[in-house]
Image (spheres, rainbow, N blue to C red):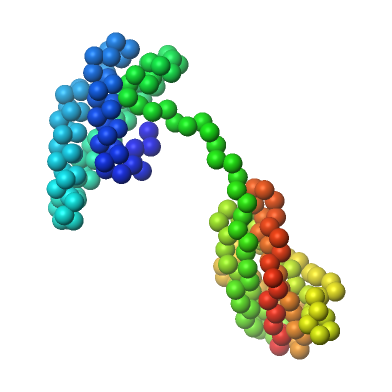
Amino acid sequence: MNFSKALPEQLLAQGYAVLKGLTGNANFTTLPVDLALLKSTLDAYSVAIGEARDGGKKAIAARNRLGEEVIRLLRGLATYVELNCKDDMNAFLSSGFQPRSSTRTPAQPLNQPVVLNIDQGSSGVLLASIKSVRGAKTYDVRFGPVGAGGATPPSWSMKTVAKIKPPVAIDGLTPGTTYAIQVRAYGPLGHTEWSDSATRMCI
C-alpha cells in the first residue's frame, strides 16, 4: 500500500504488473476496479511521465494528477486482494502485488555526538551547542572543572536532556573556573562513548 513513496516509473511498473496479474485471474473474480479503466489510466500515466521529463510545470502537474489516480485504483485492488487471498501467499503473489516485508531492520549504533562550541550565558552559566545524532533518545552532558595543567576533571557532574536545541544550559558554575564538557547519546543499543572534551572558562 506504500505506493505514494514510489518513483513515477516504479509506480507505473507496479500498476502494469497488477494489471497483468489480475487479468483472467481465477483467484480474484469480483474485482472492485474495472481493469479496462486501470489500463487506460496507466497508459495515460505512461505518456504523462514522458512528457514531464522536460520539466514543464503543466506536464508535471498532469503526471502527478494521473499518478494519484493510479494510486487510488491500486489501493482499492490491494485491499480486495488482501481480503480475498485466503492467506494463500501464492494466490496473493499471482495478483502482481508484492507483500510488505516482515523483516525489521536491526537497530544500528548511533553516531558519536560532539560539543560544537561553548558560549557564555549569564554569570555562572555556560551554553553547550551539541551536534545532534539521528536516533538519539536522550543526551547526557557531563561537566567538571579542569585539573592542574589542563588535566581531566577529577570529578564530573551530569545532566540528561531530551533536546539539544536551544543549546544546553549548564548553571551553578564558579566564575573564573575553566570547565570541560563532554556529551554522549542514548539510543536503542545503549550509550555512545563520551565525546572529546570542549573547554571554556566561565565568567
Q: Is residue 82 above or below residue 71?
A: above
Q: Nearer the viewer, residue 109 or 80?
A: 109
Whether residue 168 is situated above or below residue 60 in the rendered picture: below
- 201 relative to 107, above or below: below
Q: Give how far across and how far down residue 161 sits, in percent.
A: 66, 62
Quadrant housing residue 74: top left
Residue that appears at 61% across and 77% down: 117
Residue 20 lies, in percent from the top left, at 25, 23
Which residue sits at x=51%, y=31%?
102
Quick check: can you spot residue 161? yes
Seen in the image, is 101 located left or right of residue 37?
right
Instruction: From the viewer's perspective, tell me whether residue 192 is left or right of residue 154.
Output: left
- Expressed as whole percent of the image width and height from the top left, the position of residue 119 reads 62, 81
Does residue 195 lie above or below 177 as drawn?
above
For residue 43, side relative to residue 12 (left or right): left
Task: Measuring from the top left, give residue 43's x and y in whole percent.
Answer: 16, 34
Total number of numbered labels? 0
Considering the image in quadrants, where does the N terminus appear? top left
Residue 157 in which image quadrant: bottom right
Locate residue 111: give its quadrant.
bottom right
Q: Nearer the viewer, residue 158 or 192?
A: 192
